[in-house]
Image: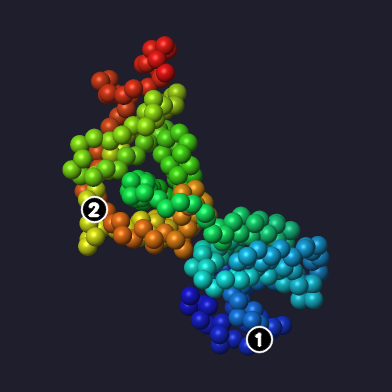
Amino acid sequence: EQKWSLISKKKSSNGYRSLRLTSECISEVFLGVAPKGERCLILFLPKSHKLDFKAVEKEKLSLEFDRETNYLVLSLRDSGYADLFDDLVISLYNVINDISDVDDYVKIYIQTFNKWSTFFEDANSDKLTQNVVKGLFGELQVLKDLLEEANSDEVNSVLDSWKGPYDTGHDFVLDNKDIEVKTKELTKPDVTISSEVQLEEVYGKGLELLVLSVDQDLKNGFSLKEKFYQVKELVVGMGGDTAILIRAIRQKGLTQHNIHEYDNFRFKLRCEETYDCLKDGFPRLIKANIDKTIT
């Protein structure tokens, strides 16, 4: 945001006011403001480099190549998405900053546009129930805990391990174990296991049931939005790919523009309990211990 504010003091060049993103980036990537005031990201290509590219226009983003200046310009067409555009900039920088080959960084620049353009579309879904919001809150808390234990080289693999929003398999799929997360009210004595496969282990891996107990606390609790931004701040600080996180919440119809709609649900974590599902005596119904005549 400081860089964006500095651009307003810059003189216009070829219709754009711009400021280099950082001198540490080998390719010449500039934050810019277009003649009509749109925020944009400009990749200055060497004059000798020829690019055959047809402009792409989405509802909120566009990408076009100016052959006169050799600028590849990624523009934000809806100022209401400025915060998400900043995430795009950071994500692009993290993957492009050390690349010196022109063909390679142009390819990554275009790929980043294609990957992120779907995040700028409005997600269509029904309103989430309180139980679904509570479940997502708990999974984000676990994701935050896992990230805090990881190093910067592991951040993207930790993000990829979060499978809960995709409703496939277990909530977290790690190298050595899977984790199934259940978030319940503190006063509630039990959790619901939805099927005979939910607590079934993958061969050769451990399986944990992690139960989070929360209170509904409108004064001191955290909303789903606040928990999401706690995780996102960790990811950015560790140099991770926020696109993985944003893609996950979109599976539930959530975006950074509608997640505030659930601010009326606020939870305070009271305790966490971990159960080894493979331990002798742990009570679970799975396919392996149900008679084959029962379905």
At label 1, the amino acid type is Ser
In the picture, the disc for residue 122 is: none
Q: Neighbour class for label 2 at 10 Å: few (<14), some, many (≥20)? A: some
Query: Of 215 and 27, which appears nearest the observer?
Result: 215
Quadrant, the C terminus: top left
**Residue beneath disc 1:** 12
Image position of 126 with respect to 182: above or below: below
Q: Position of residue 26 (x, y in %)?
A: 63, 66
At label 2, the amino acid type is Gln
Q: Answer with the quarter of the image where residue 213 lies.
A: top left
Image position of 167 with respect to 110: above or below: above
Q: Answer with the quarter of the image where residue 49 lies.
A: bottom right
Q: Neighbour class for label 1 at 10 Å: few (<14), some, many (≥20)? A: some
Q: Helix, strand, or loop for circle 1?
A: loop
Q: Position of residue 68 (x, y in %)?
A: 80, 76
Q: Residue at x 33, y 46 (%)?
A: 131
Q: Residue at x 28, y 35 (%)?
A: 191
Query: Of 25 and 210, which appears nearest the observer?
Result: 210
Q: Answer with the quarter of the image where residue 74 lies.
A: bottom right
Q: Are the residues at dot 2 and dot 1 in contact (C-beta closer than 8 Å)?
A: no
- Which of the marked residues, 2 or 1, is nearer the chain's N terminus? 1
Label 2 or label 1, whichever lies nearer to me, is 2
Residue extending furthest toward the left: 187
**Residue beneath disc 2:** 216
Q: Residue at x 70, y 57 (%)?
A: 107
